[in-house]
Image (cartoon, grey):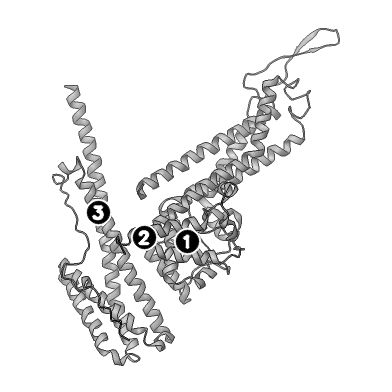
Amino acid sequence: MTVLAIVLGLLAVWLVFTFNKLVGLKNQVLNAFRQIDVQLKRRHDLIPNLVNSVKGEMKFEKETLENVIQARAAAVNAGQGGNMNEVLAKEGMLTQALGKLFALTENYPNLKSIEVVRTLMEELRTTENQIGFSRQFYNDIVTRFNIQQQVFPTNMFAAILGFQPATLWELPADSVERNVPKVDLTV
Amino acid sequence: MNIYEQQTSNKRTTMALLGAFFLLFLVLGAGFDYFYLSFDPAGAQPTYVMNAQGYYEAVNTSPQLIPYGTIAALLFGVIMVLNSVFNGAGMVLRSTMARRAVSADPAEQQFLNVVREMSLAAGLPPPAAYVVPDPDVNAFATGFSPENSVIAVTEGLLRTLDREELQAVVAHEMSHIRNYDMRVMTVAAALMGAIALVSDFAGRSMRYGGRGGGRSSGGGRGKGGGPLVLLLFAVWVLLVIFAPLFSRMLAMAISRQREFLADASAAELTRNPMGLVSALEKIRAAVNPTRAINNGVAHMCITDPRGSLIEEKSGFAADLLATHPPMEKRILALKMMAYQKAPAGA
């Protein structure tokens, strides 16, 4: 009888510890996700300024600039819609459009001498990096959270305690970012 | 060993380090009590002196029951550690004349941005960013917990490195913060200094007599004691002489081990080992010593501030006393990481 009581008591203690650990991780996951959100919003706010300030110098790249504007609008819409896959796809497209713009600015050395543009470029660049790094951190945390749930013997209780594996932030299968870039080496 | 085990192991190392230094302080202080202040826990041992009548008479030498030396040594150590915990970061920053990075300057704005990026990658609150006015290329991190930590770089570093390399260096310092390396190293540095002072004090007292120095009457332990006491005294004197060296070697060994680990975690944060490789190559090429950073902060820097020639040495002496592993080994380790990441056959 006492043996049974001790075993049950130990099990209860273990359950409490496991539950608390999982709750901690779950909140870290939520927080990490919010961090990405903050960065995405910041990027949306910066883009119009940048486009406006480079417009004068880069009038021959009208198409690229319009692409950026459109991609931004689509991403903002997707963000309001709240569909996760949609957000991922649209933000991916925006990243690509911006990448192209960055590459093209190399052809306009004059841009570098304009202080506003330089500051904005650096701002946007650090935002891009921050999105990347907070995404990386989110995925690390999610992986830890999921591993915690899936190891034996926690896997028998995780679902009962109301925990579900979180989804990793990855590109959708048909994302444009997955396309291999075409390299043109003709001179 | 993953990063979480590493943090636990570092916290354990801090405790072990504190324990080791506690013992050292105890031995230094207790020896001082025993040999100089004639502390005697056993209480009054009557000594017999021949009196005027020609008889031996028991004379109670007043026993010294409070181990002043031990208490003083331990108290001194504790105060030094507490001081380093609460003022350590401020003292380091003042000693290097570091100032806060300002966003008005484009290069420093970039540095601020990079620090933010790396704090996101590490999932930690962003540390304060400081700039050390020195033309040499160097960087260090300090602070006792991730919440109030500081990353400082020299002006030379901001000028020399490009964005990617700066990111790698900041990631390296961020890893020191994340792994609780600064905590180990701050405590080690404080205790190293305390040991040096205490042993210096004990060594100087030796000149002014005491039981070992030939003074055999009066307050000392009488007739010079047996061979056992002499042996103990010899061991204690050796310990007093070598304590600063031992503590330094201990701290340096810990520091070197941390550098490799911080390099590896930096690569984990940026997922770009080659960035740190090219940063280290540039840092290596700048052979001038960093004048603004003194030796006390050496073990917190990304490279030894005494100039890169020290890092090129390898061999027994360098292995014992260098604060950092040879640059060549660090670069090699990072390059191996980069190769492992590349797909097979590439």
Element under disc 2: helix
Q: As shown in the figure, which amino acid type bears the numbered disc 2?
A: Tyr
Q: CA distance from mark 3 to mark 2?
A: 25 Å
Expressed as whole percent of the image width and height from the top left, the position of residue B59 reads 75, 14
Residue that appears at 58% across and 38% down: B75
Q: Is residue B186 toward the left or the right of residue B242 in the image? A: left
Q: Is residue B101 toward the left or the right of residue B133 in the image? A: left
Q: As shown in the figure, which amino acid type bears the numbered disc 1?
A: Ile
Chain of the residue where label 2 is placed in the rendered structure:
B
Q: As shown in the figure, which amino acid type bears the numbered disc 3?
A: Thr
**Mark 3 or mark 2, which is nearer to you?**
2
Disc 2 + disc 1, Cβ < 8 Å: no
Chain of the residue where label 1 is placed in the rendered structure:
B
Q: Residues within 10 Å of mark 1 (few under 14, many from 20)?
A: many
| Quadrant in the picture for the C terminus of chain A | bottom left
Expressed as whole percent of the image width and height from the top left, the position of residue B236 reads 65, 31
Q: Is residue B85 visible?
A: no
Q: Which residue in the protein does label 2 denote? A: B339
| Quadrant in the picture for the N terminus of chain A | top left
Q: CA distance from mark 3 to mark 1?
A: 29 Å
Element under disc 3: helix
Chain of the residue where label 3 is placed in the rendered structure:
A
Compared to residue A51, the image places residue A168 above or below, namely above
Q: Residues within 10 Å of mark 3 (few under 14, many from 20)?
A: some
Q: Is residue B218 visible?
A: yes
Disc 3 + disc 1, Cβ < 8 Å: no
Q: Do the residues marked 2 and 1 share a common chain? A: yes
Q: Which residue in the protein does label 1 denote? A: B151
Query: Which residue occupies the extreme front position in the image?
Result: B345
Compared to residue A7, the image places residue B115 above or below, namely below
